[in-house]
Amino acid sequence: GTARASSSTPASESQKLPPGMVLDKDGKPCRLCTSAASWRAMAKKASAASSATAAAAAVATIPATTSTNNDCPPDVEQLGRSTWTLLHSLTAAYPTTASNEQQTEMRSFLGLFSKLYPCWVCADDFRAWMAHPSGKNEPRLSSRAEFGQWMCEAHNAVNRKLGKKEFDCNFWEERWRTGWKD
Ligand code: FAD
């Protein structure tokens, strides 16, 4: 593939890409797959070369900060934080015991989510994690307790991949549903 700024990217392209820069499947820079910092680095390079590349065209849309309070399109981190808020909130609002229909609906949501998540590299890895051949990462949907725990494990798999600290899943419900006990 031509998509990641990695060793699998053809040299001609990877030379132009700062670390962390991810391309869309059509070869254009994928903002929703890239951190604001890498995006800015790319834009700097592009304007230095003052070439009429897709990167140069992107300069005008660089977020000044990664704060959640700007009016700019999200980078991979802002999209991630917002999405985890939605995903954990779905588990918080899930029934204490779920009917077959509720389980089927959530399974179908997760299947579509993992195909449609707009950071495509994130989506590919998340889908692969869910589909682990052992079956150990299949969504567990029989109850809120099970689903909340599963989502916490899913988030921890991404945390590990990114070299972040893992979250203690005993506390998922305090973080996302009840609030912290004093
Ligand atoms: P986040 O990881 O966004 O977490 C937000 C808050 O959730 C934390 O502050 C903490 O309070 C809480 N939390 C943390 N861990 C857990 C847990 N295990 N259970 C419950 N609560 C928790 N980014 C990439 O760069 N590459 C990727 O491949 C990638 N894949 C992703 C896949 C998915 C499905 C999603 C939703 C996001 C992905 N991201 C990816 C984004 C990444 O996970 C983070 O959202 C982003 O890096 C911002 O991280 P953060 O440190 O602000 O906290």
Image (spheres, helix red, strand yellow):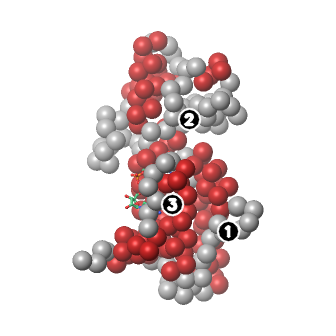
Residue at mark 2: 22
The residue positioned 41% from the left and 21% from the top of the image is 44
* In this picture, residue 39 sits left or right of residue 64: right
Report how far apart the C-alphas of labels 3 and 2 lie in the structure: 21 Å
Q: Position of residue 4 (x, y in %)?
A: 61, 34
> What residue is shown with label 1?
136
* Foreground label between 3 and 2: 3
| Rendered location of residue 161, percent (x, y) | 55, 50
Tell me which residue sits at (70%, 61%) in the image.
131
Q: Quadrant of residue 16?
A: top right
Tell me the amino acid under the disc marked 3. Answer: His
User: Disc 3 or 2, which lies upstream in sequence?
Assistant: 2
Q: Is residue 38 above or below residue 100?
A: above
Tag 2: amino acid: Val
Is disc 1 in contact with disc 2, using a CB cutoff of under 8 Å? Answer: no
Q: CA distance from mark 1 to mark 2?
A: 29 Å
Q: Which mark is residue 155?
A: 3
